[in-house]
Image (spheres, rainbow, N blue to C red):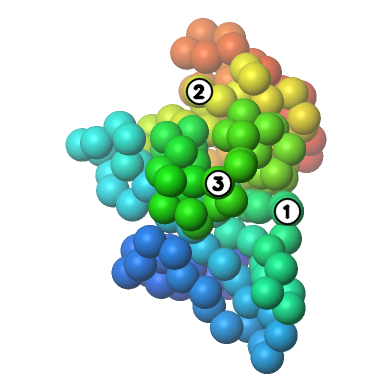
């Protein structure tokens, strides 16, 4: 878990220094990071969220992991305009079909708002990855049919 957080911190640090960055993994494979939002709290259209995919032989993977989920939809719109994603990308289809999982660092709203808001339209079933305490916060305080509807079923049980 600590190693996962260190990798996440490294990816976010690299991504914060550029709008789109390739981090060399090997001679033919790269991680490609697309910042969707890089701030916290003050601007709802720029909250912490990054897309991570791999590139092999200059071909981007069609599967992405969202590292945090503060700003999703607006960030994808900007990424399309800046050509970090293909111009013909449909943001609804992208959210539903190409984001395969969300890795959430912690349960603060500036890291999960976009993820939460997009759950009603995303019925494809996503993995939500995080520390037990983070998953517990999301489950108990947001997906509880009080603060927000419980749109998903629970996989592994949190103790």
- Residue matched to label 1: 62
Name the front one of labels 2 and 3: 3
> Dot 1 surroundings within 10 Å: few (below 14), some, or many (20 or more)?
few
Q: Earlier in the sequence, mark 1 or mark 2?
A: 1
Residue 6 position within the rendered picture, expressed as x and y whole percent measured from the top left: 50, 71
Q: CA distance from mark 1 to mark 2?
A: 23 Å
For label 3, the SS is loop
Q: Can residue 4 be spotted in the picture?
A: yes
- Residue pushed farthest top? 146
For label 2, the SS is helix
Q: CA distance from mark 2 to mark 3?
A: 24 Å
- Residue pushed farthest left? 42
**Looking at the image, which is closer to me, 36 or 110?**
36
- Residue matched to label 3: 87
**Looking at the image, which is closer to me, 142 or 95?**
95
For label 1, the SS is loop
- Residue matched to label 2: 117
Name the front one of labels 3 and 1: 3
Q: Is residue 25 above or below residue 128?
A: below
Q: Earlier in the sequence, mark 3 or mark 1?
A: 1
């Amino acid at each position: 878990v600590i190693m996962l957080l260190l990798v996440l911190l490294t990816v976010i640090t690299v991504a914060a220094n550029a709008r789109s960055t390739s981090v060399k993994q090997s001679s033919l494979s790269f991680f490609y990071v697309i910042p969707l939002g890089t701030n916290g709290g003050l601007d709802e259209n720029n909250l912490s969220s990054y897309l991570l995919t791999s590139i092999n032989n200059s071909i981007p993977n069609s599967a992405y992991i969202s590292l945090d989920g503060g700003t999703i939809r607006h960030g994808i719109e900007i990424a399309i305009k800046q050509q970090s994603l293909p111009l013909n990308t449909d943001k609804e289809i992208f959210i539903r079909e190409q984001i395969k999982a969300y890795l959430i660092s912690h349960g603060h709203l500036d890291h999960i708002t976009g993820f939460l808001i997009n759950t009603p339209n995303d019925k494809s079933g996503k993995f939500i990855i995080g520390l037990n305490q983070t998953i517990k916060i999301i489950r108990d305080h947001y997906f509880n049919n009080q603060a927000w509807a419980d749109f998903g079923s629970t996989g592994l049980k949190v103790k």
